[in-house]
Amino acid sequence: MLVVALTGGIGSGKTTACQLFKKLGTPIIDADEIARLLVQPGQPALNEIVKQFGQSILTAEGTLNRAKLRQIIFSDVDNKTWLESILHPRIRQEMARRINELNAPYCIVAIPLLVETNQMEIADRILVIDAPETEQLKRVTLRDNQSQAEIAEIISSQATPTARLAVADDIIHNDGDLERLQQQVESHHQKYLSLGKTV
Ligand code: ATP
């Protein structure tokens, strides 16, 4: 089976593109969803996080206080490195397990921080969703209740478009309307179906 990693910056259209691939019958494995599942109450990764940062990293309900964790890792790079050492191997293992269970010509593994976390080797091909920064800002402001400045800061903390495009085998240019996005998803789908037959 051909494994296609899909990546792109914030608000580039990754989720929308995945939904379109899914409608065409493509199995999608979502790294963010796996990351969320791994820190649910009772999961070993959450227990390790509590051991490291103390009970105060939990909410009153016993779930992970994500805002607090974000603060802790933004303010100290060692904490970030430690957290990644706990989560990334588990995310990789779970992605590999899910890939192995599939029976399809190809699948898409959505990894927003593929380039930042240097996980390019997980896939046979890398599909980058590329959108102009002005569109990213516009779409995320419309979607979330965040200021342009906050979104711009996230964009600048992520890999540059040049770094992403440097590792891309395929590119979807999400600079137009949804119909244009859909057309590109469909043509990539056809290409991956035929490439999948040869893998
Ligand atoms: P994030 O990195 O924040 O998870 P994302 O890359 O998954 O974002 P989406 O959530 O798919 O991006 O898209 C961001 C917003 O822009 C959504 O509200 C989506 O509906 C909208 N959007 C995406 N592509 C287009 C398009 N071509 N035309 C209009 N709106 C779009």
Image: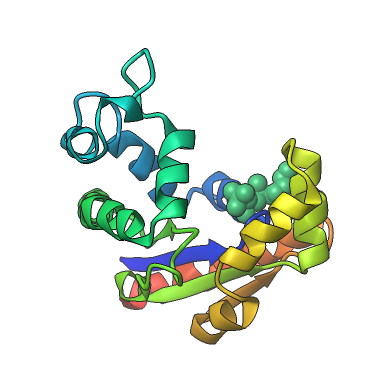
Q: Residue most toward the bottom?
A: 166
Which residue lies at the image location 71% right of the left edge and 50% below the top edge? 150
| Rendered-image quadrant of the C terminus | bottom left
Is residue 97 visible to us here?
yes
Which of 137/31 is in front? 137
Q: Which quarter of the image is occupied by the N terminus? A: bottom left
In terms of image quadrants, where is residue 8? bottom right
Residue 132's quadrant in the figure? bottom right
Residue sticking out furthest to the front:
75
Q: How many marks?
A: 0
- Please tell me which residue is depicted at 73% across the width and 67% down the height of the picture: 131
In the image, what residue occupies the spot 78% across and 56% down?
137
Frontmost residue, 50 versus 143: 50
Left or right of 59: which side holds 102? left
Nearer to the camera, 105 or 18: 18
**Residue 54 percent across, percent down from the top left:** 24, 31
Q: In the picture shown, does residue 3 fall above or below 17?
A: below
From the viewer's perspective, is residue 174 above or below residue 64?
Answer: below
Q: Position of residue 144 (x, y in %)?
A: 72, 38
> Does residue 137 appear to the left or right of 75 in the view shown?
right
What colouring does the structure picture have?
rainbow
Q: At x 20% / y 51%, what residue is drawn?
A: 97
- Residue 17 in sight from this viewpoint: no
User: Residue 21 at x, y = what percent?
Assistant: 56, 53
Coordinates of residue 130 in the picture (x, y in percent): 67, 70
Please identify the residue farthest to the top as the structure is shown: 61
